[in-house]
Amino acid sequence: DIQLTQSPSSLSASIGDRVTITCQASQGVKRYLNWFQQKPGKAPKLLIYDASNLETGVPSRFSGTGSGTHFTFTISSLQPEDTATYFCQQYDDLPFLTFGGGTRVELK
Amino acid sequence: QVQLQESGPGLVRPSDTLSLNCTVSGGSISGSNYYWGWIRQPPGKELEWIGSVYYRGSTYYKSSLRSRLAISVDASKDQLSLRLSSVTAADTAVYYCTRGAMLWGQGILVTVSS
């Protein structure tokens, strides 16, 4: 199985701050990595697909970079509605999907 | 726009079989080149892929669940099904059906309890 190590597991930031989350794959996944946002009691929402493509309707303050084994997710200017858990998902080994452990983003 | 909707009992007794369905609307299971699958998330824990079925019928299961799990499609109903036998409290989770990696249903909470 491809393991995804996501860090940090939680962070606290102020409105307007730049927030960065990393996802490290145990083996190369090319660019087959997605980023999701999950709020309590809700289904995950796709934000970034194929490492860096912004899903339709998602604000441009969200972005992703990377390929192979190292990926980065960024919120350029944190907004109150961005408090949520974010996680990465690889699908290079489809259908055997794996997920990062998640990062809880809170407001300071 | 394709949408997925899970359905089934929210409470299952230990040692019984958990059965869920996922209805696909706005599209066809058989007419599309996708893996259809199930992901679950125990309360407060990480997401876990548990299995998938290719639209042509091949199945793929998480190794630790293979002996208890069956996933199938009913193309006539555009429906995906999951059956997990001999459940325990550890199977309590929100179960999501998915198309590929990116399209998810809203999820259904299944609690295993007597």
Image (tube, coloured by chain):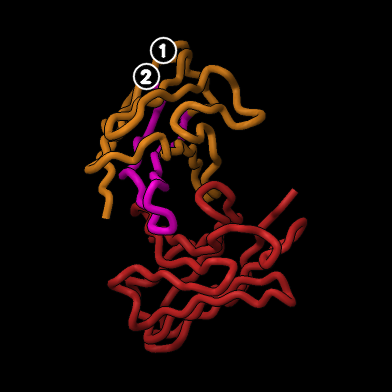
The residue sitting at 67% across, 65% down in the picture is B29
Where in the figure is residue A2, as x and y percent of width and height?
27, 50
Q: Nearer the viewer, residue B28 or B96?
A: B28
Rendered orange, the chain in question is A
Where in the figure is residue B100, as x and y percent of width and height?
53, 54
The residue sitting at 26% across, 35% down in the picture is A24
Image position of A79 (left or right of A100): right
- Chain ID of residue with mark 1: A
Residue kind at label 2, given as amino acid type: Ala
Instruction: Write down the residue under mark 1.
Output: A17
Disc 2, SS: strand
* Image quadrant assignment for residue B14: bottom left
The residue sitting at 62% across, 66% down in the picture is B6
Q: Are marks 1 and 2 on the same chain?
A: yes
Q: Which mark is residue A13?
A: 2
As measured in the structure, the alpha-carbon distance from the residue carrying label 1 to the one carrying label 2 is 6 Å
Residue kind at label 1, given as amino acid type: Asp
Q: Is residue A57 magenta?
A: no
Q: Quadrant of the N terminus of chain A?
A: bottom left
Disc 1, SS: loop
The residue sitting at 44% across, 85% down in the picture is B13
* Image quadrant assignment for residue A32: top left
Pointer 1 with pointer 2, Cβ within 8 A? yes
Q: Nearer the viewer, residue A59 or B108?
A: A59
Where in the figure is residue A106, as x and y percent of width and height?
39, 28
Image position of A48 (left or right of B27): left
* Image quadrant assignment for residue B65: bottom left
Rendered red, the chain in question is B
Q: Nearer the viewer, residue A1 or B30?
A: B30
Q: What segment carries the magenta color?
A: A83-108
